[in-house]
Amino acid sequence: VTSTRLAAGLVSAEIAGNAGPASTGAYTTAAGAWLRYDTGVDGTAFWRAVTSDATTATVTTTAASIAANTSYELVVEVNSAGTAVRFWVNGVLVATHTAHLPATSTALGCTARLRTLAAAARALRLGRMTWSSL
């Protein structure tokens, strides 16, 4: 997986367009919670769990690796109080965030994005996206 920026989750604004500095965890202009992989800022091929309050991001490098031509089930779960977000990759809990969460009043939408970072073809195949409110 090279020259690629992937993101899937719940966001308030576009997140695939600019990565931002690696020191801030990138993508801090949008509020939300998502899983991402960005060869422009990530040093290893592992999914990152991201929460952002649109000012500051918390980014956790998970133990779930990412590879080309591989299917993943990605789940972003916000608790009903809006105080914690859990991230799952292929049925395994990979991170829990309680800091830099979007405000409960923030309108979030689903996204699954791919951006190429080089003059090369890339593809993202999306099988299904579901939304559940408990």
Image (spheres, rainbow, N blue to C red):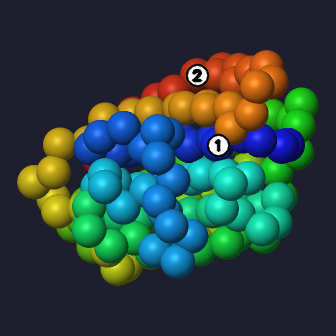
Q: Position of residue 40 (x, y in %)?
A: 68, 54
| Residue 117 quadrant | top right
Q: Is residue 93 visible?
A: no
Give the secondary structure at mark 1.
Answer: strand
Name the outermost residue toward the front. Answer: 119
**Residue lying at 61% horizontally and 32% vertically, measured from the top left:** 115
Quarter of the image where one finds residue 44: bottom right
Residue 36: where, in percent of width, then height? 60, 52
Whether residue 16 sits left or right of residue 123 in the image: it is: left
* N-term mark: 1 or 2: 1
- Is residue 3 shown above or below 116? below
Q: Residue at x 51, y 27 (%)?
A: 129
Other residues around mark 2 within 10 Å, as few (<14) / some (14–19) / many (≥20): few
Q: List the residue tagged with mark 1.
A: 5
Q: Which residue is mark 2?
A: 128
Per the image, label 2 sits on a secondary structure element best described as: loop
Residue type for callout 2 = Arg
| Amino acid type at mark 1 | Arg
Q: Quadrant of the N terminus?
A: top right
Q: Position of residue 85 (x, y in %)?
A: 41, 65
Task: Say if 77 sits above or below 67 in the image.
Answer: below
Question: Is residue 46 visible in this depiction of the protein?
Answer: yes
Q: CA distance from mark 1 to mark 2?
A: 20 Å
